[in-house]
Image (cartoon, helix red, strand yellow):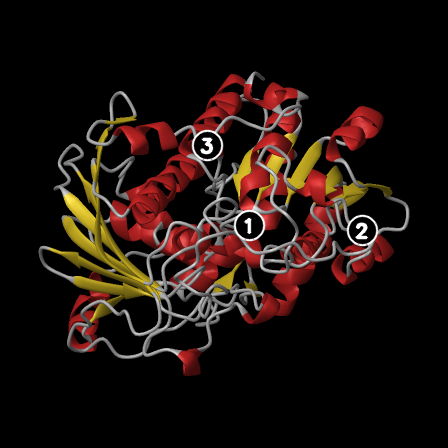
């Protein structure tokens, strides 16, 4: 990513433009937001377009596709979904009538591989892995929705594949990682404002899809008619077959250990992403279930409290993160907390976005250092010092924060073109998602996990250690683990 600041940005930050300072005999003024958008669009237009193959056309897939369309730099030449008759798939197909449409992504690669240079993967969590591995194996740049994968081992294989192909751009779909939060957290860390952090509470307390399911479940849901035109067998990719039920599709797959990553995998990448990267956390050495309500071995608890412990890193002290999800399952709220705001980039698909009226505080983090307490909302929301009186006292010491040069989708496309560096490449995104994989394992087992960060093995529980790799893939899908 370029660190250059345009002349207009410099004037805006320094206040010279507002003062009407004369430069070269002309009064300079900071460009308006409308002019900045127009200039950016013109700059992007000169760069051309990236040819893209798209996997996963409906729901979140369609939402992300709209964001790529807005960049003006995406040329979608091929697209794929196992449920082509769904409303979202039909909208995506109609938006790109020249794109060739497939049900099986493997056939799309075979027939159209020479026509595209990048792949966007917007499928359920468990099926990210084969799509990503095939793309990297065939020399394609990859944008994949968060979380990266459902198992620790699959994330590890994707990280290693990206390392073997350093010329390929990879980007995880935690879009706030290119927004104001990214730039501010980086600047505050480098300036020593954020330092000596010892504890973080990360919380997501909205209703989830599985809330209301029977926690005394003793078998998977019974078979229902498969939607017309859907390839339900192919939907499973590497995962073992389950009879179709509307509690799996569409969207409800996130509720089940066999397919999704629950609230932690869904929102963790939006809440602790900058904390994880800029505090150099890596992987935890201990993951402890603190409290589960409605625990069972099929789907995620009604509420979860999980503690992650991280060791010292250089001159940074040991710290821990406590994850809180579920209605009413809040962390301690410090005095002077005030209002918690969400980033403008929070999606609203299927009623799954956080609503301010639904919770005591919006999803976010509370971060404790030896001197200061910080709060932040989710996605692109920026960090604040609390209480407000302390924030005012610190105001003069806060560094200038650069403006974002691009949003997350633009950043990926610009990185493919060699104009910027990707903000959430697999070397950053992968270990973050492995933290979630370990947390989900602690949820599923309801037991403490002791993790050896050097060997990447679980040393206190043989069942948990085996779960790092999960069950073998279905027949016919083994090849993706050998790429």
Q: Quadrant of residue 27?
A: bottom right
* Horizontal and vertical percent position of residue 340: 34, 74
Looking at the image, the residue that sits furthest to the left is 370
Which quarter of the image is occupied by the C terminus? top right
- Quick one: SS at disc 1? helix
Label 2 sits on residue: 84
Q: Nearer the viewer, mark 2 or mark 1?
A: 2
* Horizontal and vertical percent position of residue 134: 65, 26
Callout 1 crowding tier (Cα within 10 Å): few <14, some 14–19, many ≥20: many
Label 3 sits on residue: 155
Q: Is residue 194 visible?
A: no
Q: Is residue 214 visible?
A: yes
Q: Quadrant of residue 41?
A: bottom right
Callout 2 crowding tier (Cα within 10 Å): few <14, some 14–19, many ≥20: many
Whether residue 405 is situated above or below residue 164 in the rendered picture? below
Q: Nearer the viewer, residue 476 or 314?
A: 476
In the picture, measured across the screen, residue 33 lies left or right of residue 376, that is: right
- Quick one: SS at disc 3? helix
- Identify which residue is drawn at 54% across, 45% down: 125
Going from the N terminus, do you reach mark 1 or mark 3 first?
A: 3
* Horizontal and vertical percent position of residue 395: 23, 67
Label 1 sits on residue: 408
Q: Quadrant of residue 380?
A: bottom left
What's the CA distance linking mark 3 and mark 2? 28 Å
Going from the N terminus, do you reach mark 2 or mark 1 first?
A: 2
Whether residue 244 is situated above or below residue 434 in the rendered picture? below
Looking at the image, the residue that sits furthest to the right is 98
């Amino acid at each position: 990513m370029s660190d250059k600041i345009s002349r207009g940005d410099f004037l805006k930050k320094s206040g010279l433009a507002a003062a009407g300072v004369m430069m070269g005999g002309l009064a300079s003024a900071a460009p308006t937001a409308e002019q900045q958008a127009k200039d950016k669009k013109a700059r992007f237009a000169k760069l051309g377009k990236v040819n893209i193959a798209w996997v996963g056309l409906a729901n979140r897939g369609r939402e992300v596709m709209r964001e790529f369309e807005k960049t003006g730099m995406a040329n979608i030449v091929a697209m794929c979904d196992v449920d082509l008759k769904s409303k979202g798939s039909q909208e995506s197909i109609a938006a790109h009538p020249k794109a060739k449409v497939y049900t099986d992504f493997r056939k799309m690669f075979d027939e159209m591989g020479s026509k595209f240079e990048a792949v966007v993967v917007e499928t359920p969590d468990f099926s990210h892995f084969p799509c990503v591995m095939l793309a990297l194996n065939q020399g394609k740049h990859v944008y994949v929705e968060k979380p990266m994968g459902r198992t620790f081992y699959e994330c590890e294989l994707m990280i290693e594949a990206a390392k073997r192909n350093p010329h390929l751009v990879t980007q995880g779909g935690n879009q706030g990682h290119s927004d104001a939060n990214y730039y501010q957290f980086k600047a505050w860390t480098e300036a020593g404002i954020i330092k000596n952090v010892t504890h973080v509470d990360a919380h997501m307390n909205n209703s989830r899809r599985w809330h209301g399911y029977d926690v005394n479940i003793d078998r998977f849901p019974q078979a229902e008619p498969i939607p017309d035109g859907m390839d339900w067998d192919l939907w499973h990719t590497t995962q073992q077959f389950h009879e179709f039920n509307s509690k799996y599709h569409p969207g409800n797959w996130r509720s089940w250990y066999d397919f999704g990553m629950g609230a932690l995998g869904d929102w963790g990448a939006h809440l602790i992403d900058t904390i994880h990267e800029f505090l150099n956390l890596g992987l935890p050495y201990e993951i402890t279930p603190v409290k589960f309500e409605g625990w069972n071995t099929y789907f995620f608890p009604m509420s979860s409290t999980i503690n992650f412990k991280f060791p010292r890193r250089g001159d940074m002290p040991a710290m821990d993160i406590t994850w809180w999800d579920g209605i009413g399952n809040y962390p301690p709220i410090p005095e002077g907390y005030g209002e918690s705001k969400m980033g403008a980039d929070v999606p609203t698909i299927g009623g799954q976005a956080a609503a301010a009226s639904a919770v005591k505080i919006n999803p976010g983090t509370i971060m404790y250092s030896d001197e200061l307490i910080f709060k932040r909302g989710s996605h692109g929301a920026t960090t604040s010092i609390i209480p407000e009186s302390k924030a005012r006292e610190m105001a003069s010491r806060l560094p200038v924060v650069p403006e974002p040069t691009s949003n997350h989708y633009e950043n990926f496309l610009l990185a493919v073109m060699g104009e910027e560096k990707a903000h959430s490449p697999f070397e950053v995104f992968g270990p973050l998602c492995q933290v979630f994989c370990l947390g989900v394992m602690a949820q599923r087992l309801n037991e403490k996990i002791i993790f050896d960060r050097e060997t990447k093995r679980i040393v206190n529980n043989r069942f948990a250690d085996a779960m790092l790799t999960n069950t073998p893939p279905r027949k016919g899908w083994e090849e993706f683990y050998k790429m």
